[in-house]
Amino acid sequence: GKTDGQALAKAEPPPPVRIKRITLQGGNIAYSDRFIKPNYDANLTQGLTFLERGGQRIWARLQPLTRRFLPATSVARAYPLGLVWGFLPCGMVYSVLSMTLLTGSALRGASLMLAFGLGTLPNLLLAGFLLKRFRDAVQGRPVRLAAGLLVLGFGAWGLFNATSLGGRLWQGIVCAV
C-alpha cells in the first residue's frame, strides 16, 4: 500500500512559487521571498560565482583531454570532444541553471533546461554550418580586423555605460511584470 507521505503528496497540490522581488543592482542579483514561511533573502550572485569557480576547476582538469580529439575530422572524434566541451564554464548556462531553482520542482527545472538547450541548438548548428561554409572568408585579415574592432567597440560602449547599463538591460530586455 501507499505510505502516509505518498497519499498526502497526491492529495495536496504543491504551493505556487511567487517571486515578489528580484533585484539586479551593482551586478548582484538579490531575491526576496515573502510567500514561503519563514521569509528569506538570497544573493543569487554568490551562488553563481561558486558555480563558475567550480566549473573552472573542472574545466582546468578536463581541457587537456580535448587535444586528443582535435582536429575533429570525424564523428568518432567530434562526439567525445563535444562531451568534454559540455563541461566548459558558460555564464548563460549557469544563469539558466540558477533559474531552475526558482521553478518549484525538478520536472519544471529540467523542462527549463531542455527548452534552453533546444532554443540554443538551431543557432549553434547554423553558426557551425556557416563557419564551415565560409571558413576561408572569415579567416581573412579584413574580417578578423572588423570583428576585433566590433568587439572593441562593444567593450568601449559597455565601459562608457557601465554605471547604468545593468538597470537599462534589466528593464529593456528582461520582461518586468
Image (cartoon, rainbow, N blue to C red):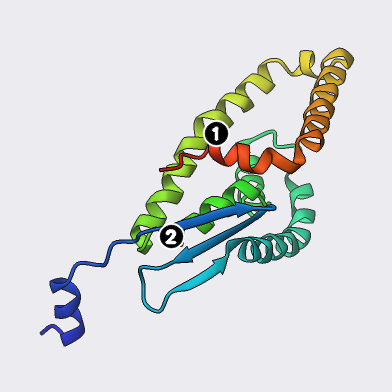
Q: Horizontal placement of 76 versus 58: left or right? A: left
Q: Horizontal placement of 130 versus 105: left or right? A: right
Count of marks placed on residues? 2
Residue 140 in the image: state x and y as whole percent: 85, 15
The local secondary structure at tag 2 comes to loop
Against 120, residue 85 (above or below) is below
Q: Amino acid at mark 2?
A: Leu
Q: Quadrant of residue 141?
A: top right
Q: Which residue is mark 2?
A: 102
Q: Is residue 70 visible?
A: no
Q: Which residue is mark 1?
A: 172
Residue 16 in the image: state x and y as whole percent: 29, 62
The front one of 128 and 74 is 128
The residue under the point 69% across, 33% down is 73
Q: Horizontal placement of 98 versus 157: left or right? A: left
Q: Is residue 13 visible?
A: yes
The residue under the point 84% across, 28% down is 152
- Other-residue count near label 2 (Cα within 10 Å), few / some / many at <14 / 14–19 / ≥20: few
The residue under the point 64% across, 35% down is 74
> Disc 1 and disc 2: Cα gap in Å?
22 Å
Q: Amino acid at mark 1?
A: Gly
Residue 2 in the image: state x and y as whole percent: 13, 83
Against 35, residue 64 (above or below) is above
The residue under the point 35% across, 56% down is 108
The local secondary structure at tag 1 comes to helix
